[in-house]
Structure formats: structure tokens, C-alpha cells
Image: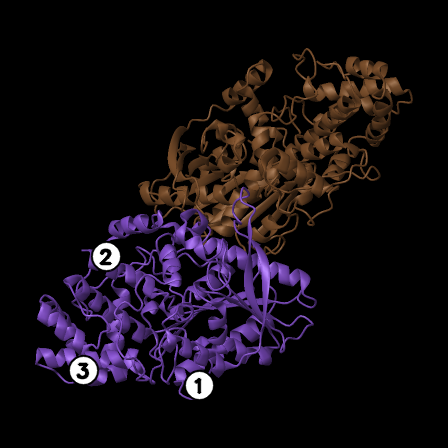
Chain colours: A brown, B purple
Amino acid sequence: MAAQLKKQYQCLVLFCLYFCLCVESLRPGFPYRKHHHAREADNTGYNYKTAYFEQKIDHFGFANDDTYKQRYLVADQYWDKNGGPIFFYTGNEGDIAWFCNNTGFMWELAPKLNALLVFAEHRYYGTSLPYGPDAVKDPKKLQYLTSEQALADFAVLIQELKANVPGAQTSKVIAFGGSYGGMLAAWLRIKYPNVVYGSLAASAPIWSFIGQIPCDAQLQVVTNSFKRESLTCVKNIRKSWGIINTMGATDSGRARLSTTFDLCALLNSTADTEALKSWLVEIMFNLAMVDYPYPASFLEPLPGWPIKAVCAPLSTEVVDEVALIEALSKAVKVYYNYTGQAKCLNVNENAVGSLGDELWGYQACTEMVMPSCSNGVTDMFEPAPYNFSQISDQCYKQFKVRPRKSWVITQYLGKSLSAASNIIFSNGLLDPWSSGGVLKSISPSLTAFVIPNGAHHVDLRSSNPGDTPDITKTRLAEEYIIHKKWIEGDNL
Amino acid sequence: MAAQLKKQYQCLVLFCLYFCLCVESLRPGFPYRKHHHAREADNTGYNYKTAYFEQKIDHFGFANDDTYKQRYLVADQYWDKNGGPIFFYTGNEGDIAWFCNNTGFMWELAPKLNALLVFAEHRYYGTSLPYGPDAVKDPKKLQYLTSEQALADFAVLIQELKANVPGAQTSKVIAFGGSYGGMLAAWLRIKYPNVVYGSLAASAPIWSFIGQIPCDAQLQVVTNSFKRESLTCVKNIRKSWGIINTMGATDSGRARLSTTFDLCALLNSTADTEALKSWLVEIMFNLAMVDYPYPASFLEPLPGWPIKAVCAPLSTEVVDEVALIEALSKAVKVYYNYTGQAKCLNVNENAVGSLGDELWGYQACTEMVMPSCSNGVTDMFEPAPYNFSQISDQCYKQFKVRPRKSWVITQYLGKSLSAASNIIFSNGLLDPWSSGGVLKSISPSLTAFVIPNGAHHVDLRSSNPGDTPDITKTRLAEEYIIHKKWIEGDNL
């Protein structure tokens, strides 16, 4: 029961996994990750300045007049100071420098369109910390960690920049964001169309909330992304859960599993076996998120089309149970040990505990109620229902808050988006989060782009010789709308 | 200095005056008002049921899970339960029953368009009291009194009604509101277009905030509304301030003023003289708000075109100073003693102190920063500058909060409304609040109606044989848009 709950909880926090690199790089004992993080920055070499803006901690109430310093990064070397546009990245749940360095599309567009680049950090992440790093321990101090407050930060910061930066008064502001940042970019245009003229919301699962899609939709996409490479791979994975359960029920079996997967710590209990399975589900979920056509280091350093590589050891039918688990372990190591530097694999590596995870956990326990489950029939996972009240109790235990099921849907228009305008929704179909994305255009100014060969917000990444034509075409179409319809278009 | 501050503060709270009837009727010692209030209800005889909905006190944070019971009034006798529209009044700063009984236009439209009528009370007013009637004494308990929280209440209530009232699932919801309620109606459509399909925002001064209009704009309209009846009346009023100052500087002069105005309490100091002047400014402001063409009892029982009646004793040039003050006192009594029932006039009648005033005072001290001043040159008042920092200090002293100058402008789009849709802005040009209203259509779906002979949201009142053609025409045009464009139109 506890293991299942933990798994569901992890499904909720999966969404934030891809920023853990930065957060975890701050912790001792992760030299591999530290190295990885540094290399990403070296690769990009983008040139920006760091600035801070004093924000109200509570925009929606006046009893608390405390402030915090919000970090934002600015690159003005391409900017036409006579009204050139402002490209504004709406920071996600992590260190803004990392998003800045991983959003090459903005850096490629800026010199073409003479834009000012601004990357604004999300409150409570990175170094933008109301009440400091210990706020996470106090529900009263954490209460200002909401998307509404974050959007208000962005809106106030933009108004401030437009008022005070010489040349910015008439600049059109275009918001960019990916994943949760993409949701924020869309919501910023929806709620503050006075502040941003248009938004590119890449891989923004704005329809992933309760009742909007079936809870098994995400893991169905993961299954499909694996199926695309090998139907046998999917069959083998589905078969493996029962074998792990059987082996994981005995001491000798758990020892065998521990050795096969090169685990850093021996599996000691059936709870540990559950943790192993959760970890495997996470890996598969992540693989679908980062199934880019070229070698990349987004979550982990990986080859191009990593699912293909992962499925290679699993693409012939394996009858022998031990052999199947061995094949699965080879597959997993493609994800976690592609560079061959890890001595052992840590099942708890991405589990709840690091600061960033906890903060996203709080958001998942309040507003970001995005259910996940698996049916075991059309997907390749064990059946695992979604249990809202269990999660709610867990949230109360951890943070003294309970999630509100439909608040975000009421607040951000749900599926009734047609009164909004000037938003591009892009989704890669390999990405599990595409299941909650806007996949069909809603109106002439609410445009959906679907990228069949695309993983998680691939369009925000720098262009790459390995890009498939649908990826390249999408970036061009996005550039066209941003340039011709928004920057050069009439004021809306 | 203090008197001037008080005057400015009263200018801020003037906006809420017209609901004081209900609030003050709850206080002992106001039989006249009580009687008045009861008669209004008798006159209308509208038939509705009272209901309550449990709302979160804090929609924008999760640390506080407290709730309160929001009152709303429902009339379903005209409703076509197969998807007939819902007309939803967004309650102002007062008892919702009073708004319900003073919004005859909705009651006239409902049977024609088979609508369900819902009048929702604004949190902290009437009987919808988070933390009870004593919340006003505690800044921590008052902190949830914001327009954002009120709009969230309305949105959540509407979603709840649509989900649970049989027949309401496909109903289009149209918001109606006047004055601050009109601002809320417009903002509800702007921020929650998923919840309301269109809004009639009557006399909603959404552009009255700092920097949006000159602070003397309101009192300029008051002056114009008087000038329309008699230029000499305006000249006499302008002249009277100096006379009051001279008389008010001595004991004998103050005694004379007290007698002339039939004041209940003798003027004892120059501060009292300042209070008298503030009271007179308020009366003139209110007269411009309620300058309806037929006898009405909105703020006070008054004849038709009350400014004409008020100006009658002042429409010939009065040279003698005492005679001028006597004429002014006759004028004032048209406003405060039209029915001849008052034994004396109470200068502090509308001053800060009653519960409703204090609550609106809090809103004026936080979000609703609508400056007021007079120049003494183009208007008929004494020059009185607007001093934000003084008001801010006063607010801190009273409520432990400070107003945020530009938050409301950022939050509710300011003058950049063009991305919004389906809002009717109506304004009567006699009404001082029209100075901050939207007087020109912004787009085909953001329509402005200007009513040259109209006072404060006259179009929301029941039709009356005394209505001027521009008033009648505006109601017809509003009905056309609501009926043909919104209810029968395509989904937007």
C-alpha cells in the first residue's frame, strides 16, 4: 500500500525530474552529476547577466508585506533598443540558469529578431527563495509557492522592465516556456494579455488535471513510444514485473535482483522491491520524455533515440526469467550508465528527498493535481489505480496541505480556452506529457503543433543536424508566427 | 492637514456610500434609514430564495483551509431548465439583497430570456462573513478581502452551480454588475472567460486608478452635472467655501453655520468646519451619482432630477454671504431631508465608522487606489491635492496595510483590454464615476455605451416612464447584445 502510494507520488513528481540535475548538483556526493551539469553550461557558452528584482512575497494579500529577491538573467547583445521585442522565459521548477542554457531556440531567434532575452526564475527555486532555503520546512512559509504568485511575479517584473529599461516601453513581450514553464507561458498570456503579446507553450500538459484525461494516458504514451521501437520490447517489459515480484519476495531473489541491476544498496524487503519497480517505471517515463534523435544530456547523457538503444537487449523474446531480468538491467544501464562512469545504480536516486523534489511535491500536493495510473492491459506496466484521497492524506502528512481537485481547472480555463488568443501549443508525441497537451488548434490564434518524432519540448532546444524534418518544420512555423503574426502583426 | 486627509479618504470611500443604507440600517438609531430600506424592498416585491455555499477563505494559498458560507439569492421561476441562460450578479461592497432589489433590469430580462437569476454576495459584506463580523478588527482576518478572492468565489460558485443544478450544465452565464460590482463583472469575464460568457459592466470605473485619469476628473464631472442645471449654481457653490472658512474660523460663525444647516451637533472647531465641508462635497458627489430623471430612493429619497431641485435656491446670484449659506443649506436639505422627517442633519452620517465603510476603507487602502482631488479652477470645489503617501500612512495606521499603486492595473489589464471580449461597458455621463469608465468601444465585442442623461448605472434599474430616450435606448441595445450575440450567438 505504502509502496503503491509512493509510486503514485513519484508519478506526480516525475514531472519535475528533469531539473533535478541542478538541484542535486548542489548536494555533495554527486560528482557525476556535477560534471554533467558543468558540461552542459560549457557546451552552450551563452552570454548573459544576472539581475535581481524585489518582489512582494504575497501578491494576493496585503497583511504580509515581505519581499524576496527574484533572480533573472538578461542578454541584450542582440536587442534593437528601439522597440525590439522581449523574449521572456517563464521559469520552471528549478535553477533558471539551467533552463537558460537548455532553451537554444530562444538564443537562435534573438539575433534574427533583434530580441532582448530575459529568463526569470520561479519563486522558491534556484536562488529565488522567499524565506530562504528552509522555507520548505514550514507550511506557513511555503504557502506562497503557487502558480498564481509565480505568474504575478512574472507580470510585475515585465511591467517593471517595460517601465524602466530605456527602449522597452513599446516592446512586445513574447513568453516562452517548456513543460511546467510552458504551462506558465500559456497561463501568463491567458491571465495577463496586457503583459505578454503571445506565448510559446512547449510540451505544456495544461489538460493533465483530474477529469481532463484518463489517468493512464501518460503511461500509455510511454508504452507507445517503446512499442514504436519494438513490440517485443514492450512484451518483455510487461512480463518482467511478475518476475521481479516473484524474485523480490525472497531474500535470495532480492539478492539476485540487487546483483543483476548493480544496485548500490541491497534490496532488503518487499518494500525495496516496490522501490525498484518505481525506479524502473521512472526510467521508462524519463526515456519517453528525452527520446531525442541525437545524443543529448538533458536528464542523463544518452545516445540518439535512446529508447531504441534501451530496447535493443529486449527486442527478442526472452523465455528464461533470469535472462529477461538481465536483459532489462542492460536496458536500464543505457539510461543510467551510458558513459560507464557509475559504479553502481541507486534506486533512490530520484526519490523524494532533494530540495527541488520536495518543492515540486508541494506544488503537486496543492494545485498541480495531475493524476497518473496504469491499467496493465493496454500499457506495459503493472495495474496501479489512482487514489486521490490517499494522496491527499499523504500530502497532509508531509506538508499540512491538501490538493484542491478542480481549482487549477477553474483558474486557468480548463478546456474552455477559446476566449484566449496568441498561444502556440507544441507537443512531441513521444513525450508522455503530450497526453495532457493541446494537440488540435482551437482558433486561428490558438495554434497546436504536433511533432510525431518529438520528445519533451524538443522545439525549445537548439537546432541539431539530427533533428527530424517534423522538428525542424515546427521550429520554422513557430518562428513564422512569432515574427510575422506577433512581432510584425497588428496590436491585439 | 488631518481634515484634508480625511476629506481625501472620504472621497475614496464615497464609492461605497450607496450601500450604507443596508449596513447602517442594522445599527440602532437610524429609524429613517431603516424605514427607507424596508420600503425599497416592499416596492420591488421580487421573489427569490436564499442559499449558501461553502467557500475557501483563501483560494490563493493552501496553508489556510478555513471556509465561510457565501450567501446567494436565486430566482428560478422564469428559467428554462433546458439550458436557459444564467444571469449572475457579481455582488458589490454591501448586502446582496439590496443589490438584488435595485437591479430591476435583470428582473425584466429574466422572463423574456428564460433566465435563472443568481445574485451572489461579496465576501466580508452582508451576511457572507469570513471570520464573522469582528474580522474588521484583525488585519490577519481581513487579509482575504480582495477582489481576486471575490472573483474566485464567483467563479467557483458558478462552476459548482453548473455542475450540480440540473439543467444548468450547458447554460451560458452572463454576469451583471454596477459600480464596483460592474468592475467585478468585467474582471470576471476578463479573468474567467471559461466561467462567464459575457458581462454587462454598468458604471464600472475600471480606469480610475493612479495614473489612468487625472485625480480631479471625478469632481470635474460633478461640477459639469451641476453646471448643466445652472452655471450660477456652480458659481455660488464655489463661492461658498471661502465664506464657510471665514465663518468656521470663529465660535460665533460656527454657531451660525450650525444653526443654518440644522446640524445635530454644534461645530466646535475648525476641524468640525472641515468636516462640514467634506460632508457638503460628499452630498454633491452623491447627487451627481443619483441624478435620475424620476423620483428615486437609491441613496436618499429624492425628486426626479435632484440636482435641478438642489440648484433651485442657488440659481440666482447671491451677493450676501449669509444669504448664500442659507441658500446652500436649503439646497443640502433637498438631499438629506426631502421627506421632511429628519429633525437635524448629521455631518458625520457617512463618515468612516460604520462596518461597511470600514470594509470598503480596507479595500481602498489595499487594491482600490482611486485617487480623488480638486483643482478649484475648472471645478467648483476648493483646491485639494491628492497625497498618496499621506493616505498610505493613514492606511497603515488604521489597518496595518499599505496600498499598492499599480497592482490592480497589472492584474486587470489596465487600458490594454483588447485581448478581452464580450463585455458591455455602460456609463452615464452625469455620474462622477464615468470619468474612469470605458467610454469608447474597444473592439466589436468590447462595446461602450454612453448615456448623456444617465447617472450611476441607471441602466441596471427597472425601466421607468421617466426614463429619457438615451436610457431606454441603451437598455434595448444591451438586451440585443445579451440576447442575440451572446445567448443565441456561437460559442466563443
Side of A347 where A68 appears, left or right: left
The answer to whether residue B106 is above or below residue A465 is below
Of badges 2 and 3, the one in the foreground is: 2
Q: Quadrant of the N terminus of chain A?
A: top right
Q: Quadrant of residue B372?
A: bottom left
Point out which mark residue A19 bears: none
Q: Position of residue A5 (x, y in %)?
A: 72, 34
Q: Quick check: B30 above or below A180?
A: below
Q: Can you identify the residue that label 1 sits on?
A: B464
Distance of label 2 from label 3 (alpha carbons): 29 Å
Q: Name the subunit of mark 1.
A: B
- The label shown at residue B5 is 2
Residue at mark 3: B314
Q: Quadrant of residue B6?
A: bottom left
Residue visible at 33% across and 43% down? A82
Q: Amino acid at mark 1?
A: Asn
Q: Secondary structure at mark 2?
A: helix
Whole-percent x and y of residue B480? 52, 77
* Residue B216 visible in image: yes
Frontmost residue, B319 versus B109: B319
Do the dots labelled 1 and 2 sit on one chain?
A: yes
Q: Earlier in the sequence, mark 1 or mark 2?
A: 2
